[in-house]
Amino acid sequence: MHAPSRAELDLSDKESVMRVMASRDWAAVINAAAYTAVDRAECDPNSCWTVNAVWPAVLAEYAAKASVPIVHLSTDYVFSGDKDAPYLETDAIGPLGVYGASKAAGELAIQASGARAVILRTSWVVSPFGQNFLKTMLRLASEGVEIKVVADQHGTPTSAADLARVIVRVLERMLKDLSLSSGVYHVASAGETTWFGLAEEIFMNTQLKCDRPKLRAILTKDYPTLARRPKNSRLATDKIKCDFDIALPDWRVAILQVLKDTIV
Ligand SMILES: NC(=O)c1ccc[n+]([C@@H]2O[C@H](COP(=O)([O-])OP(=O)(O)OC[C@H]3O[C@@H](n4cnc5c(N)ncnc54)[C@H](OP(=O)(O)O)[C@@H]3O)[C@@H](O)[C@H]2O)c1
């Protein structure tokens, strides 16, 4: 397994992509890199599009030519969020912003490449590492401020570690079973909540060095952002259960584990 850093493989630089792809015979490709600054993307669509749509297509073309499988991560943001139930893989996409549109274009390009590709759409990823909602909540708590959290967007937090295990399982099957067909799959923890519900769960399970913060539920309209967010980010996960026998635990279990692995 080789996980190139951005210095080695820059998805906005054709030379660098070509050099890495040609450097050895890869057995498979996993693309977890993305331009994920959802609001910045509204003012910087070219960079976002290059990383999320153009180069995933090049990676997929490589995979197709080399006859190796590719697993690509995508997002609930390909949907508008207008549906009243969890989204199925077959539901029409309808991204609300540049980021979602670029990810949808990446999906379509990969599907068109002819590569054996599994596209995993996930939602609300949390982890002890990098920047994510859980880390932001812990930082704000340490600053002792009242925290306003949106309570009318619905979705399912998913742990990056769970997601990594899913990628490995999917790829192992793709490498073993050459007849396994390509497809789009939704993968997320079980259950659902809101960002406010997630914040409550985080602070209910965290031993803070400071006082527990005061949380205030607000509406999306009271927290204006450059890019609109889907009100419904819930993903139906029956297809991956049926085809790969993969079912993630409840989101609260995932959050508890992420908190255990996070140094507060
Ligand atoms: N976070 C979520 O809630 C969420 C929800 C649904 C789907 N997803 C999807 O899950 C995947 C991973 O997201 P994430 O939350 O882990 O994002 P992230 O924390 O922003 O990480 C993105 C990664 O992509 C790399 N990257 C960005 N631009 C690059 C470039 N030009 N060349 C090479 N590497 C580049 C970054 O490298 P550096 O470390 O050098 O910056 C970083 O390692 C993405 O496909 C995203 O669309 C995420």
Image: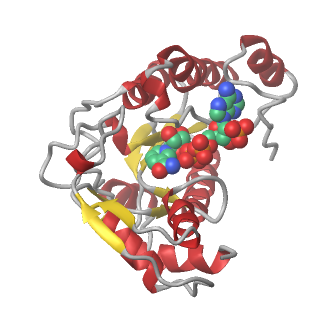
List x then y, in percent, for residue 220.
Answer: 24, 49
Looking at the picture, tell me which residue is in the foreground, 229 or 3.
229
- The residue sitting at the left extreme is 84
List x then y, in percent, for residue 36.
Answer: 53, 37
List x then y, in percent, for residue 182.
Answer: 46, 36
- The reply to whether residue 145 is in sight is yes
Considering only vertical position in the picture, is 96 above or below 50?
A: below
Looking at the picture, tell me which residue is in the foreground, 97 or 142.
142
List x then y, in percent, for residue 233.
Answer: 29, 51
Ligand 1 rendered quadrant = top right
**On-image quarter of the C terminus:** bottom right
Describe residue 192's horizontal placement relative to residue 63 as left or right.
left
Q: What coloring was used for the rendering?
A: secondary structure
| Residue at x 15% of width, y 55% of height | 85
Can you tell which quarter of the image residue 249 is in?
Answer: bottom left
| Residue at x 55% of width, y 52% of height | 170
- The residue sitting at the right extreme is 23
Considering only vertical position in the picture, is 110 above or below 249?
A: above
- The reply to whether residue 190 is in sight is no
| Residue at x 87% of width, y 24% of height | 23
| Residue at x 83% of width, y 30% of height | 7
Looking at the picture, tell me which residue is in the foreground, 261 or 26.
261
